Amino acid sequence: MNLLYTGKPIIKCCWRKGDLNMIEIGKVQNLKIANFTSIGAYLDADTGVRHDNILLPIKQLPEGSKEGDELEVFIYRDSEERLIATRKKPLAQLGELAYLKVTAKTQIGAFLDIGLERGLFLPFHEQKFPIQVGKGYLVKVYLDKSQRLSATTKIYEYLSAESPYQKNDKVTGTVYSVNPEMGAFIAVDNKYMGLIPINEYFSELQEGDLVEARVIRVREDGKLDLSPRELSYIQMDNDTSKILQGIKNHEGFLSLSDKSSPLEIQSRLQMSKAAFKRAVGKLLKENKVLQTDGGLKETPIDL
C-alpha cells in the first residue's frame, strides 16, 4: 500500500460539462472507456478535453473490454495526486461513516485501510484521541481543502438521534469518545447517538472498541442511554458466575465483602457494589458460598 503524501495543492476536484456530468472524487460512478493505451484504458471524463480522461490501470480492465463500454469505478488520487480509477469496491465512500483499521502512523497523521492500493489519510489534527496501528476506529470520509480524500474521528455531528430502537432492545456499536465524568459515547450501528453513562460503566473502554449493549432509556431528544449489562434477572446469574469464577481463580477464596470499596469491586469483578451484594445474597441463599470476615469461599460439597 502506497503511503506517500506529497502536500501538493490540487486545483480541481472534478471536471464538469454543463451542469449534468461530473466526476466525483471518492464516489463509485459509471464511466465509459474512451481509448486504450499500453498501461490501461482512459475513461471519458465528459469534458471534451482528452487530457482530462481518467486512467483505469490495465490490471483493472475486464477481459474483452472495448471502447464505449461503461464500467462502474471508484475515483481517487494516486500517490502522485493524479485522479485514477479502480474497479475495487472501497470500504467507504465520500461522506460515509466507516470502521477502518490503522495501517501506519507518520509525523503528520495516520493511514487507514480503505480496501484500495493507497491508504486513506487521517491527519493528526483530525485525531481526537491517541490511535494505535492495527486497531480500528469509526471515521468519516471527507475531502480536505486541497480536494484529497481524508478521514476524521470528529464524527459527533454526523450521527443521528432518530434511531428505531426502544427500551431493552439489544444493540451493537463503536466507542467514539470516552469522558471520565460522563461515560462512553457509542455510535450505535455506527450511525445513532448512544451513551453508556458513568453509573453503567464498569469495565474499561477505549475509542475504537466494539460493544454490545442494551437500551435502558430513550431520551426525549432521541439519544440512547445504554448498558452493557443484561436485564436484572439475567445479569444476576452472570454476576454470580463471575463471583464463583473469582473464588476459583484465587485458590478458593475471594477477598471481597460488603465492606470492600465500590472501586475495588468494580476493578476486580466489573460490577457495581450493589450488584455484588445482590449476587452474594443469591449465592448465600442457594448455599453455594460461605461468607467470612475477609471475603467469600465456596461451600464445601459435603455441607
Image (cartoon, rainbow, N blue to C red):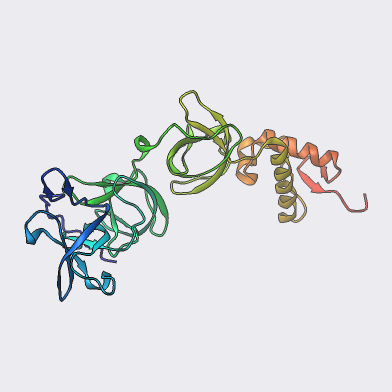
Residue at point 63%, 46% (across, down): 268
**Please, is residue 104 above or below residue 124 in the view?**
below
Residue at point 41%, 34% (across, down): 160
**Please, is residue 38 above or below residue 90 in the view?**
below
Horizontal and vertical percent position of residue 253: 76, 50
Residue at point 51%, 26% (across, down): 219
Which one is nearer the viewer's eye here, 231 or 189? 189
The answer to whether residue 153 is left or right of residue 201 is: left
**Please, is residue 197 above or below residue 78 in the view?**
above
Which one is nearer the viewer's eye here, 189 or 238? 189
Residue at point 68%, 33% (across, down): 274
**Please, is residue 7 above or below residue 201 in the view?**
below
The answer to whether residue 22 is left or right of residue 201 is: left
Horizontal and vertical percent position of residue 112: 33, 57
Query: Residue 170 occupies which quadrant of the picture?
Result: top right
Q: Residue furthest top?
A: 220
The answer to whether residue 190 is left or right of residue 31 is: right
Which one is nearer the viewer's eye here, 145 or 18? 18
